[in-house]
Image (cartoon, rainbow, N blue to C red):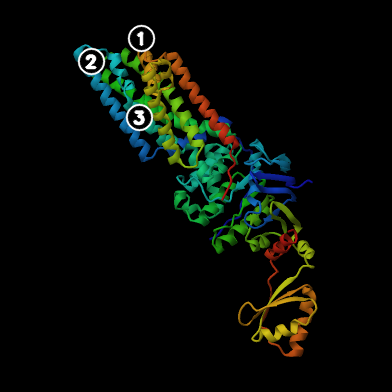
Amino acid sequence: MTGVVDAEAVTKRYGEVLGLNGFTATFAEGITGLVGPNGAGKSTLFRLLAGQLRADAGRLTLLGQPAWGQGEFRRRVGYCPESLALFDWMTGNDFVTTLLRLDGFSRAEAAERSARAIAEVDLTADSDRRLRVYSKGMRQRVKIAQCIAHDPELILLDEPLNGVDPVGRAALSALMRQLSAAGRHLIVSSHVLYEVERLTDRIVMIANGQAIAQGDLHRIRDLIDSHPHVIDLESPDPRALGRALGAWDHVVSLEYPEPGRLRVLTRAPDTFYAALPELVLTEGFVVRSVRSADDNLDAVFRYLSEGRR
Amino acid sequence: MSISAPRYVQGPVVRVSRSSRTFAIFEREFRRRATLGPLFIIALTWFIVIIWVVTTVYFATLTGGSIRSSFEAPYESAIWGLLLLIVTAAVGAGSLADDLGSRAITLYLSRPIRLADYLVGKASAVGVWLLIASVGPECVAAGVSAALGFTSTSTALVVVGAAFAVGLVMAVFFTGIALALSSVTRRSLYAGVAIFGTVLSVTAAVSVVSGITGNADLLYASLASNTQGIAEAAFGLPAPYATDPVWSAGLMVATGVVLAFLAWLRLSRIEVVGE
């Protein structure tokens, strides 16, 4: 394995609880999404990468160095933890400057870099306010500022968009893409799956402390074509439509979640999509919308994690 | 909201040494504790001790009493010890507990610093505040007494030296206690209560037990007795002392160092687990 981050059978226990359970994955250059539900082990992996936890078993390297420890190579890594707790008594500018000084920058250089990083996350106007008055979104942004201010090669972002408003999310996503374009490698975790999907096609999916899939999102999507696929339809007469669809072999089940809506579970989505227009035309059904509930990462994750139980 | 594209123009970066990075931690921690509560307690300590010492020295000049004994008087009282205990709780209880409680320690330790650097930075900040509280008032009192003609300049300088010697020992001891107890909890309030509870209960228990049994060796477990012993010797008072000053100083410094080491041990094993 020769990725930016390589994990081989990494196990981390918290007493009786398994944080990571033989986690094996390779994180390539560019942006990689680490996707999984809460409690899947994402933050444990980040803390292991940040050198704050020590793996009980397995091998974990980042930038070719063992992850455990506080060596000088930490300068090449930027870490944005999930926790929103900061040094509340500091101003945003003090916060970033202090952490830069711990990276070994002189006072003047730290101040200059801090101002630049704070500008990059659009916090300049608030940089002299204390962190205790920052909103959740501002805290996320100042955390990202401290994470990129020392110009690291590898940037670890644990749930970076959590709590950020939609406009801020778009802006931060753009920043992440810019960082990647500038040659930085990013590992971005999220349980809000569509955000990662919009950021990158390359993902590592984690559940119960294990990597359940990794690689190109679309290829992963192909892997699950054999699983039942959920399709939502809107129709003024969903029951009549349902009776017709129920006759198809590949339709596993029908649900009527609310008036005017029909949810179909099919084992052959391609066949379904091909045959639906003909059915509508020949039988005269009115279908106002067709939407696949499985077109996002959430569905991919759900299928894969259920398949491993 | 707009976010500008980052510009990475990597020039030659001169990195500062580990000691400079440790100093950055010290500087922030020191400034962090400069809040109303600790400053009030320290100001109160200064006010009480300065008035006390200058007044005692003045009356000693009138009655022909011992000047050095007058300067040493606060160490014989439980009041100063109690004030220093309050200062310790105010500046030291949250030194590690606050970072652990907020998990902000992860931000420190994700940088290229060692746990020892982090602890040294924190300990230095607590220690300097304690030195300000413990040495400062005696120095000012000596200066004022000399300026008012109550004592000679040479005696005042001896007093300053003695105050530094005793204050340094006390600062090491109290810093060790603060770090150790602050490392075992995530709440500074609990650490503060523990600092008080531990020192006061041990001191009280030792006084009672040594009084009942008549065993003077037990006094080496008492902060008050050790401080008195060291101060009496440092200020040049005639023997016998409450305790052997060398043993007392060694014991207090060793206790402070061991407690600081325990804090390091505790932090090195702690895993900052999130929500």
Q: Where is residue A60 in the image (x, y as percent from the top left)?
A: 72, 43
* Mark sitting earlier along the chain (3/1): 3
Q: In terms of depth relative to the viewer, which is nearer, A178 or B209? A: B209
Q: Residue at x 68, y 62 (%)?
A: A197
The type of residue carrying mark 1 is Ala
Label 1 CA crowd tier, 10 Å (few <14, some 14–19, many 20+): few
Q: Position of residue B207 (x, y in %)?
A: 37, 22
Q: Residue at x 70, y 75 (%)?
A: A231
Q: Which residue lies furthest to the front in this view?
A: B213
Q: Which of marks 2 and 1 is in front?
A: 1
Q: Could you tell whether B139 is left or right of A111 in the image?
A: left
* Distance from Cα at disc 2 to Cα at disc 1: 20 Å
Task: Place residue B74 in its image quadrant.
Answer: top left
Residue indicated by mark 3: B82
* Distance from Cα at disc 3 to Cα at disc 1: 25 Å
Q: Mark 2 lies on which chain?
A: B
Q: Residue furthest left?
A: B62
Residue indicated by mark 2: B60
Q: Are the residues at dot 2 and dot 3 in contact (C-beta closer than 8 Å)? A: no
Residue A154 visible to an observer of this rendering: yes
Q: Could you tell whether B266 is left or right of A304 in the image?
A: left
Task: Place residue B63 in its image quadrant.
Answer: top left
Residues behind callouts 3 and 1 on a single chain: yes
Label 2 CA crowd tier, 10 Å (few <14, some 14–19, many 20+): some
Image quarter hosting the C terminus of chain A: bottom right
Residue indicated by mark 1: B239
Q: Are the residues at dot 2 and dot 1 in contact (C-beta closer than 8 Å)? A: no
The type of residue carrying mark 3 is Leu
Q: Are the residues at dot 3 and dot 1 in contact (C-beta closer than 8 Å)? A: no
